[in-house]
Image: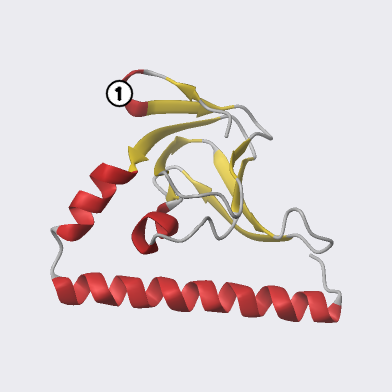
Amino acid sequence: MTEKKQSLNRVSFKANTVIFDEGEPAECAYLIRSGKVEIRKGVRTEYPQKMAVREKGDIIGEMGLLDGQRRMASAIAKTDVEATLIPRDGFISRIKSMDPVMRNVIFLLIRRLREAAETIMKRKRDAFWID
């Protein structure tokens, strides 16, 4: 991960920089302050897929913090990006303070999202479909 730390947990990424890579441990999330970030799955495979583009106001990298799993996808700065780094400890303490029922709903949704992403990637690989 190549990031330039600044005061107040602000970080900057130049265009075309990998912010985090699929399969890495999730140590933090990012609140995008400016710029655009592309979320890609299967970057290091024969069939990489663009999953989404995130921009100002969006949070990226939160799923691994919530469920303790590795990064589901890679995040690549499409433009220069300014973001606020949200460390794991602060994120987790906020989640723990949530209503337990709502917390479990969020975990369930994340599990379903991960399953759906894997199903989509498998189908695209099987069909040799590349966007």
- Say left or right for 12 vs 73: left
Place residue 45 in its image quadrant: bottom right
Place residue 68 in its image quadrant: bottom left
**Rendered view: 17 above or below 25:** above
**Rendered view: 32 above or below 54:** above
Q: Which quadrant is the N terminus positioned in?
A: top right
Q: Position of residue 40 (x, y in %)?
A: 65, 56
Q: Position of residue 73 (x, y in %)?
A: 59, 57
- Say left or right for 1 vs 89: right
Give the SS element for disc 1: helix
> Which residue is disc 1 drawn over?
8
Which class describes the residues within 10 Å of circle 1: few (<14), some (14-19), or many (20+)?
few
Q: Residue at x 42, y 49 (%)?
A: 58
- Say left or right for 46 vs 55: right
Frontmost residue, 32 versus 67:
67
Q: Residue at x 27, y 48 (%)?
A: 91
Q: Position of residue 104 (x, y in %)?
A: 26, 75
Q: Position of residue 13 (x, y in %)?
A: 56, 29
Place residue 9 in its image quadrant: top left
Q: Which residue type carries mark 1?
A: Leu
